[in-house]
Image: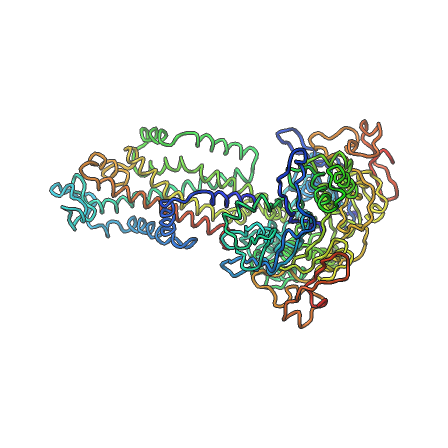
């Protein structure tokens, strides 16, 4: 520990600290809240996304699909020619961007939640089995993980998009297929180290059955790490879904999604920058917020850091 | 007490060695005080409170001397070592007062950059990954045992003579084929053998730590032969030793909660001889003239 | 009366490099109410043997008899009945207790597994806590609220709650702070007397073994090379390995008498144990026959047996 601390301290001392870096670090600290404190801003961004998903139709100023060609390409309200009626402007068909972002939040959140729960469950169960039983079970599951991880996600998605009916279910399926390995790998590693803990052996010595060992001793000790993974994955899934939809492989119109909005707006980037910028900001904010919250959770659950 | 030897702060490894002498670090004037630690306090500021990890530690080290810091987990020995390097764990740890003088230079309060540049690694190094050993992996066993001998005894300054003495020392602690093994590096030794080598490295003094303070400091013979502090006495009586078929006497109670140290002498709730005074006032460090060695010190009201 | 009898027990592992003969033909008898200590360097197989007795590892050969009954191939309900009578305390009290469970849940778990009626659980937990010197209120706390010594008391309480006959103590004090080792050791002694327990003590610390054991088995590379009552064995060790082990104990006290000792080399690998006597490459008294034939067990006195060609 001493040597690594020293190495770290010396590297830090040796590095020049450019102004930009310091500013960025300051900004990050502000987003995260006080160093180590609860990241209020990140949490409220995520809460807003979830609120939009739940209450979308009631809080959106307009219907997401309402076309008004007369008001097409209205810039955001603060720009010249903008209107208070369309806070973030309109697209090429005169649809309200803010309302569409709110509607897109629903798709993003629903897809992300389903995908996380399903891939988390599959990954956790397979990871626990591989880690606990070892041997053949571990060999089979680990090879499955290796195979899955060596297949690139986008071509796989294109394959499934060609054979499956498009829509939310397909997007969720593709995301689960690409993400369960994440959970499985990390849970397996965690169980491998948990299994060596004496309380597992002592439970067996006491005559406790395998299912009880899984439920009482393994699962609760995995909850923290699963929660951290799920939070971190939320942002990643939103970006993945947006990517699929951007490529036309994901959510199909008339359903609104952030990725689809990007795809639609890309043709008008020179005349109407807000078409692509607004959903872009939504994607970035949701992803950043989930990463910051995930980082905070990870630090909070780390007993060593918690003491400080 | 097999944890005995840990974190022995080996002094001055100023490695500006030359030519054929390269395995032995060169040394400065004998007997000069190299390191003076005075009333060092390093505290850890945690959410749940302040841990006084090092709470007024003082000791001197001459060039070539070895001081063994012993104590249970949480007694402050590691934190003392880290403080000497200016590396109390960030961000909670901080040296709050006291002085660390290395060859006349004050280290406490020195800028991080200056410490890293001019002291750490070059003038003070720390080798303590394995708590059982304080051996440097890049020097041969023989040279490490010989180093203090060379610094201590003027007539043994030649490399060959010191090495001869080192081989004798290794023999004394029953390292087989000592002469051949002296040329080996620490990784070529088994754990038990390394322990024996550490024992051979002529540990001049041992400081027994409890709750962040040095409760007793004495040379090895005096400490084992005539322990003065009730904690040291308790430790020696509570460990089974081969051939001594006596009933063990346990020290009652548990090591103190570092966040809520007992008042007065921190050992008083576990001490068989505690008095009212021990409960209320922390004992001063008393220098004893009796016993071998020039610096025998006990922090106990029984001796005050 | 013998409680535990091992006859030619072997436990092997398959690893990428081949077959590890971690325990290879071990026989000994533990009498009721006694403390039998297995001692040896790390890697000698003593912990594997303990885990085999605890049914955490399968054995490839030999038989284990417990209280007169062959328990080697027990399955299902019979195996569970045996489990209740053989419990264990491990070295690390931090790893022994699930940090997410309250002490009450930890102590009640073995009872639940064996179908103890619910209303008996509370009183039993309370009783076992008082046995190990902890207040009944401890049951409502989590492990992190206790010090290392107190945790080891909880671990001992868990081992005792099923009222076992045999308790396997695998390095029960070596991970504890020095000042509380004697406390735990005295507690174990007192419990043994009060409850008539039999202990199988696994330890590397010879001083501890001399202090705590009635009988000692010295293990080297998966085999027992010497067994006998502790005090005579430590006074007059018959096997050269036992002699070197004893002579090599580092003494904290520099003025203590030192014997001559010479352990040559390092422990050989259990993957490729040396032919003949497994200790012969390191033995100071090695003879020609030692590398050719494994020695027979020879009795040097009624209870003291040595596997060495010198005897």
Q: Residue furthest front?
A: B29
Q: Is residue B72 left or right of residue A180?
A: right
Q: Is residue A78 left or right of residue B285?
A: left
Quadrant assignment, res C62: top right
Q: Is residue B19 visible to the viewer in this orientation of the structure? A: yes
Q: Is residue C71 visible to the viewer in this orientation of the structure? A: no
Residue sitting nearer the eye, B227 or C155: B227
- Residue A177, position as x, y percentages in the image: 40, 35
Residue sitting nearer the eye, B88 or C297: B88
Q: How is the image coloured?
A: rainbow
- Residue A222, position as x, y percentages in the image: 49, 46
Q: Is residue A214 above or below residue C132?
A: above
Question: If the image is split into quadrants, where does the C terminus of chain C sit?
Answer: top right
- Residue A253, position as x, y percentages in the image: 24, 37
Quadrant assignment, res B168: top right
Q: Is residue A279 left or right of residue C12?
A: left
Residue at 31% across / 36% down in the picture?
A243
Quadrant assignment, res B252: bottom right
How many numbered discs sit on the rendered protein?
Answer: 0
- Residue B69, position as x, y percentages in the image: 66, 53
Q: Residue furthest left?
A: A70
Q: Is residue B241 above or below residue B159?
A: below
Residue sitting nearer the eye, A86 or A64: A86
């Amino acid at each position: 520990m001493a040597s690594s601390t020293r190495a770290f301290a010396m590297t830090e001392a040796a590095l020049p600290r450019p102004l930009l870096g310091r500013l960025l670090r300051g900004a990050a600290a502000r987003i995260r809240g006080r160093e180590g404190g609860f990241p209020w801003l990140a949490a409220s961004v995520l809460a807003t996304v979830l609120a939009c998903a739940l209450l979308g139709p009631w809080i959106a100023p307009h219907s997401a699909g309402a076309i008004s060609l007369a008001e097409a390409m209205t810039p955001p309200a603060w720009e010249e020619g903008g209107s208070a009626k369309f806070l973030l402007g309109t697209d090429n068909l005169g649809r309200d961007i803010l309302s569409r972002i709110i509607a897109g939040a629903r798709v993003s959140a629903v897809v992300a939640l389903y995908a996380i729960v399903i891939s988390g469950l599959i990954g956790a169960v397979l990871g626990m089995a591989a880690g606990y039983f070892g041997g053949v079970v571990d060999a089979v599951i680990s090879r499955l993980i290796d195979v899955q991880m060596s297949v690139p996600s986008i071509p796989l998605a294109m394959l499934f998009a060609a054979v499956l009916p498009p829509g939310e279910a397909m997007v969720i399926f593709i995301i689960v297929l690409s993400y369960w390995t994440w959970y499985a790998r990390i849970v397996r590693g965690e169980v491998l180290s948990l299994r060596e803990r004496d309380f597992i052996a002592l439970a067996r010595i006491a005559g406790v059955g395998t299912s009880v060992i899984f439920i009482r001793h393994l699962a609760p000790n995995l909850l923290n790490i699963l929660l951290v993974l799920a939070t971190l994955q939320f942002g990643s899934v939103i970006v993945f879904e947006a990517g699929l939809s951007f490529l036309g492989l994901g959510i199909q119109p008339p359903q609104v999604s952030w990725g689809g909005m990007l795809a639609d707006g890309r043709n008008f980037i020179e005349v109407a920058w807000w078409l692509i910028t607004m959903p872009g900001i939504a994607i970035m904010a949701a992803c950043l917020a989930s990463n910051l919250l995930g980082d905070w959770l990870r630090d909070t659950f780390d007993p060593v850091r918690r003491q400080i | 007490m097999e944890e005995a030897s840990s974190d022995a702060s080996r002094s001055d490894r100023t490695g500006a060695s030359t030519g054929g002498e390269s395995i032995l670090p060169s040394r400065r004037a004998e007997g000069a005080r190299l390191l003076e630690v005075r009333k060092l306090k390093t505290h850890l500021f945690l959410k749940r409170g302040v841990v006084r990890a090092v709470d007024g530690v003082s000791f001197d080290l001459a060039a070539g001397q070895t001081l063994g810091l012993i104590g249970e987990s949480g007694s402050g020995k590691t934190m003392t070592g880290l403080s000497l390097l200016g590396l109390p764990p960030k961000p909670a740890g901080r040296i709050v007062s006291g002085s660390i003088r290395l060859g006349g230079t004050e280290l406490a309060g020195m800028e991080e950059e200056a410490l890293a540049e001019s002291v750490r690694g070059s003038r003070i190094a720390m080798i303590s990954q394995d708590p059982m050993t304080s051996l440097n992996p890049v020097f041969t066993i023989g040279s490490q045992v010989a180093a203090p001998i060379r610094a201590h005894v003027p007539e043994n300054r030649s490399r060959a003579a010191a090495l001869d003495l080192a081989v004798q020392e290794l023999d004394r602690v029953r390292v087989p084929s000592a002469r051949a093994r002296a040329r080996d590096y620490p990784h070529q030794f088994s754990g038990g053998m390394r322990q024996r080598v550490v024992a051979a490295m002529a540990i001049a003094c041992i400081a027994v730590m409890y709750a962040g303070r040095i409760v007793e400091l004495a040379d090895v013979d005096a400490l084992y032969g005539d322990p003065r502090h009730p904690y040291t006495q308790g430790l020696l009586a509570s460990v089974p030793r081969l051939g001594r078929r006596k009933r063990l006497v346990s020290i009652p109670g548990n090591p103190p909660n570092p966040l809520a140290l007992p008042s007065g002498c921190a050992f008083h709730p576990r001490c068989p001889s505690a008095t009212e005074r021990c409960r209320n006032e922390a004992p001063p460090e008393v220098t004893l003239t009796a016993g071998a060695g020039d610096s025998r010190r006990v922090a106990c009201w029984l001796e005050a | 009366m013998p409680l535990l009898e091992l006859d030619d027990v072997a436990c092997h592992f398959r690893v990428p490099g081949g077959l590890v003969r971690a325990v290879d033909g071990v026989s000994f008898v533990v009498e009721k109410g006694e403390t039998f200590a297995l001692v040896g360097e790390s890697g000698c197989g003593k912990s594997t043997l303990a885990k085999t007795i605890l049914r955490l590892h399968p054995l490839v050969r030999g038989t284990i008899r417990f209280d007169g009954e062959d328990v080697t191939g027990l399955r299902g309900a019979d195996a569970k009945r045996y489990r209740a009578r053989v419990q264990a305390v491990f070295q690390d009290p931090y790893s022994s207790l699930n940090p997410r469970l309250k002490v009450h849940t930890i102590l009640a778990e073995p009872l639940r597994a064996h179908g103890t009626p619910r209303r008996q659980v509370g009183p039993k937990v309370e009783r076992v806590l008082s046995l190990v010197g902890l207040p009944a209120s401890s049951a409502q706390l989590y492990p992190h609220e206790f010090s290392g010594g107190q945790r080891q008391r909880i671990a001992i309480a868990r081992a005792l709650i099923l009222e076992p006959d045999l308790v396997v103590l695998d390095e029960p004090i070596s991970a504890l702070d020095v000042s509380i080792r004697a406390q735990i050791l005295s507690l174990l002694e007192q419990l043994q007397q009060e409850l008539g327990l039999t202990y199988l003590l696994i330890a590397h610390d010879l001083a501890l073994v001399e202090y705590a054991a009635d009988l000692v088995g010295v293990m080297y590379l998966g085999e027992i090379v010497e067994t006998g009552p502790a005090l005579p064995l430590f006074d007059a060790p018959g096997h050269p390995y036992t002699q070197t082990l004893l002579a090599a104990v580092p003494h904290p006290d520099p003025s203590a008498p030192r014997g001559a000792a010479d352990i040559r080399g390092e422990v050989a690998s259990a993957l490729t144990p040396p032919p003949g006597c497994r200790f012969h490459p390191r033995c100071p008294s090695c003879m020609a026959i030692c590398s050719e034939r494994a020695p027979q067990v020879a009795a040097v006195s009624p209870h003291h047996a040595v596997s060495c060609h010198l005897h």
